[in-house]
Image (spheres, rainbow, N blue to C red):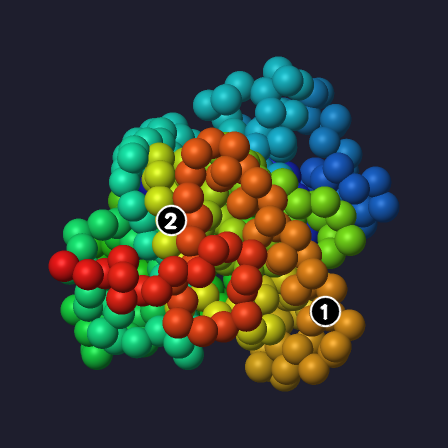
Amino acid sequence: MNATRQVVIFGSGLRGKEVLNQLPPSDQVLFFVDNESALHGQTVSGHPIYPVEVLAEAEFDTVVIATRGNQAAYCQLVEMGIDRNNIISPLMSEDNLDRLSNLRNAHKGDTIFIVGNGDSLSNEDLERIADTGHPSIAFNDIFQRFNQTSFRPSYYVVEDPIFARENPHQILNMKHVTKLFPEQIIGTFPPADDIVYYGLNEEISPTSSSYFSESPLNFGFGATVVYPALQLAVYMGARKIYLVGIDFTCGDLEALPRELRAIAANGCATERIYGECRKDEHWVEAHQRYAIKAFRTAQRFAAYRGISIMNASRGGQLEVYPRVRIETILQH
């Protein structure tokens, strides 16, 4: 019989509720803590929400982190004197930090293909990318191509929590592919040998400045999954990065407002929500502007480091990076 653990959950939002539902029955949840003062005194499923500072005096066995800014929350707890062994954080776990460390410069000096799902992408392109032997990063519904081509990405990324919740089986069933997920969707994909978590700073808006990070604990947000893929490629030591099938239409933008993501994650009609956002010209324009700003930030960073980012997509609207013909780079 499992011993009862007295648990505190750090974070009372959607992820905190997910954690509450995923804990084993033997765990006793004492209360939630949150840095958001407006939530103090409220409850989650009957459990009160307190300031994080109460942990300095409280008696408990374990704190489970379930909030945005996983790294910041972890550091906050350690600075308060909470024993690291009493903190559960998939992002900051020893296994995950080891996996992240193993990815650093794993492809130093190599060429990496970042493969999108745009209409310009052909199955022949995928076959020829596979034939190069170079590593590749793909995302979202690339698995729809698996019955048409032998191409399998070296790495797979999904950033959109709605897409993740709608396609867990297809994603988890990809074999021999390292899967990288932002901490925001840890609740959808529990730890596994082929899963690596990275930190993603969503504390920005379409009007704020973008940034590019070499630290996978704090990647910059770019309103599109292509942006963390670029940061991963640089972290892994790539010297040449080719974008293929990155058409950059409004359908590629993934920066749904958090309120709508939470609604959708709770079971509402996600297609309707996506449709409403993408019909909103102001929403599309704001997020496209932000994504372009992020892509330019990546270009400046890469140029400073002597890294080449080129767009080998056959079509599309992304003109930040120099265009190259895919036939030229895939010549044998």
Q: Which residue is mark 2?
A: 241
| Three-letter amino acid code at the position of disc 2 | Ile
Q: Nearer the viewer, residue 95 or 302?
A: 302
> What residue is shown at x 21% (from left), y 79% (from top)?
148
Circle 2 packing at 10 Å, graded few (<14), some (14-19), many (20+), is: many
Q: Nearer the viewer, residue 84 or 281?
A: 281
Q: Which residue sits furthest right?
A: 38
110 over 225 or under it: above or below: above
Q: CA distance from mark 1 to mark 2?
A: 27 Å
Secondary structure of the residue carrying tag 1 is helix
Q: Is residue 163 left or right of residue 272?
A: left
Across and down, in percent, residue 331 comes to 19, 61
**Looking at the rendered structure, which numbered label has been put on residue 285?**
1
> What residue is shown at x 55% (from left), y 70% (from top)?
317
Q: Nearer the viewer, residue 250 or 179?
A: 250
> What residue is shown at x 64% (from left), y 18% (from top)?
79
Quadrant position of residue 301? top right
Q: Quadrant of the C terminus?
A: bottom left
| Three-letter amino acid code at the position of disc 1 | Glu
Q: Earlier in the sequence, mark 1 or mark 2?
A: 2
Q: Are marks 1 and 2 in contact (CB under 8 Å)?
A: no
**Looking at the rendered structure, which numbered label has been put on residue 101?**
none
Across and down, in percent, residue 7 comes to 56, 37
Count of all numbered marks drawn on residues in the image? 2
Of circles 1 and 2, the one toward us is: 2
Circle 1 packing at 10 Å, graded few (<14), some (14-19), many (20+), is: some
Secondary structure of the residue carrying tag 2 is strand
